[in-house]
Amino acid sequence: MKKWVKNNQPIFVLAIVGIACFFVYSFLAFSAPKEIFNSPDETANYVFSCNYSNGSMGIAEPDNLKVNGVIIPRSATSNANGDIVPGYFLGMPIILGVIADLFGCYIIPFIIPIVSAITPIFLYLGLRKIFEKEVAMLSALLLFFHPIFIYYTAKSLMPNVIFVDLLIISLAILLNIKYKKGIKNYFKPRVLKTYAIAGLLLGLALSIRPSEIYWVALLYFALLLFNIKKANWAGITIGIIFVVVAFLPTLHLNKELYGGYFQLGYNTRLLSVDLNDQVANGNIFTILSSFFSVSAIFPFGIKLVQSITVFINYFWRFLAWFNIFLIPGIATFFIYFYKDKKHYTKKFVYLLITLAVSAYLIIYYGGYVFYDHFDASKLTIGTSYLRYWLPIFVLLLPFMSYSLFAVWKVFEKVRINIKASSTILFLLVLSLFTFNLVFVKTDESLFAVKQNLEKYNQTRNIVLEKTEDHAIIITDRSDKIFFPKRKVIVFLENYAIFPFVANLIDSRPVYYYSMLAPDDMEFINRTKINQNLKFELNTQIDNFYLYKISLDLNL
């Protein structure tokens, strides 16, 4: 054991840090009320993952057939049978559901914290093949402490972190394959199994976020191109096969839930084409031309000024205290870049990949305006931009690590253990800023999220007590509180839902949960809803009102 620890000291240290970080990452999973979440995406992922573990992902709702499918929460949709089904890619609920089938639904909020606690070890194993081992080690430590990585791991049912985790592990496995000349080495079971595992992990990552396929394909193509002379084509073929294998459950469920293998839960078509029609017609050239069209690669358009402005706002103004190490780090990188003849090409390829992927993701997501916070002008950690740009933050970690690596080199001949002391001091200071941002600073930080979840839980308990089991609740953004305990209809000023509501009242109780006070509700009902409905106050919960809806027989 002592010999193993000595020979694998970085891995041992990272494993210890990972164990400690698991409890940090699981803060909400341990402390917040169970089965209630802060976003509709998290709620949907938990509900559908748990459902899948119990045998069927969809939730039956026959009344959807007579109300145009409006009985759905956000992040869900209804299919041809009226069932409530995921309104997004199915990879994540399938993966979490399979694990929940083995351990129970209680494990679901802990799965991503567990994976994220070991991912930096694989980041180290991968980066040490490209950079100095010290830089790889520092990069792994920085990933543990990166505020965006911590935050979205703690909000453990968002898809972005698990996508990045699986991608890092897949790449690390490929980078650590030992290449040997000779045709016999191509077919060694251990080598083929390694490619199969790497391919399966890549396929699982893409099944969670297929929209990332362009830059991910670039990443793996660069890896292949760099190793083209010693490429194991048998292993690569096995890997590609397992990428496809990882997609088979998604394709099967697409057919079961949506009616077609390439049909999706999204309201918009993937890559702006109807893949089912194209595949049915065998029109492969149309599919390829659509797949590589500008509108497919950049579906939000190319808006350079807007994209760069938004990125600077969040990367520099919002995370300046973390990213400030990038500037001296890049300078140090170029100093050692020209000195290190052994890894010169590898580092150059990594630099090009980082620039290309970063440019693509900045343009791709910067072209859209996300309104995650009620105050659109406010920079918060909960914005979608930060989770979508997580791959950029990970790619930049080695360049940031060169800052501390330079300190190590300056003092490497000093007798005191400057490496350990400077690293510990650096991480302690960094952790203070990280803790403040992730847990305290904004109204979307984790302490605030926990308080919100406790309030949501109290609200849910009151509403469940006041409403019948088969009741439907109309709401704006509180669907995440009540679903799936109660079926919900999302209003959000879509008055077209109320003619459908009138069709439901005879068969089941319908309620409206809103911030509108009775006088305001009466005015809105008279001037905008105008469906001969009566809104009778049932109960008030803080600033919200729960109304029972019925037909107004006096009209």
Image (cartoon, rainbow, N blue to C red):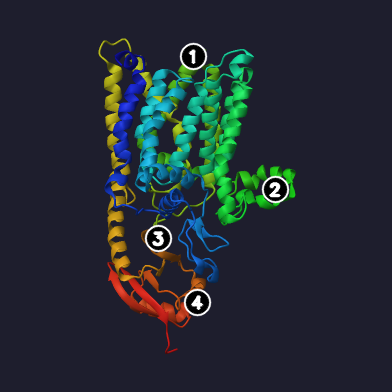
- Three-letter amino acid code of the residue under disc 3: Phe
Cα separation, mark 3 vs mark 1, equals 57 Å
Q: Answer with mark 2 or mark 1, whichever residue precedes in sequence.
A: 2
Q: Answer with mark 2 or mark 3, whichever residue precedes in sequence.
A: 2
Of residues 302 and 190, which is closer to you in this image? 190
Cα separation, mark 4 vs mark 1, equals 73 Å
Task: Give the residue pinned by disc 3.
Answer: 483
Cα separation, mark 3 vs mark 4, equals 21 Å
Of residues 520 and 510, which is closer to you in this image? 510
Residue 222 lies, in percent from the top left, at 59, 27
- Three-letter amino acid code of the residue under disc 1: Asp
Cα separation, mark 2 vs mark 3, equals 36 Å
In the image, which disc is placed on residue 503?
Answer: 4
Category of crowding for the residue at label 2, using alpha-carbon neighbours closer than 10 angstroms: few (below 14), some (14–19), many (at least 20): some
Residue 281 in view, yes or no: yes
Please say if the residues under marks 4 and 1 sit with CB atoms less than 8 Å apart.
no
Task: Give the residue pinned by disc 2.
Answer: 279
Residue 134 lies, in percent from the top left, at 39, 19
Task: Give the residue pinned by disc 1.
Answer: 340
Task: Report whether 316 appears left or right of 539.
Answer: right
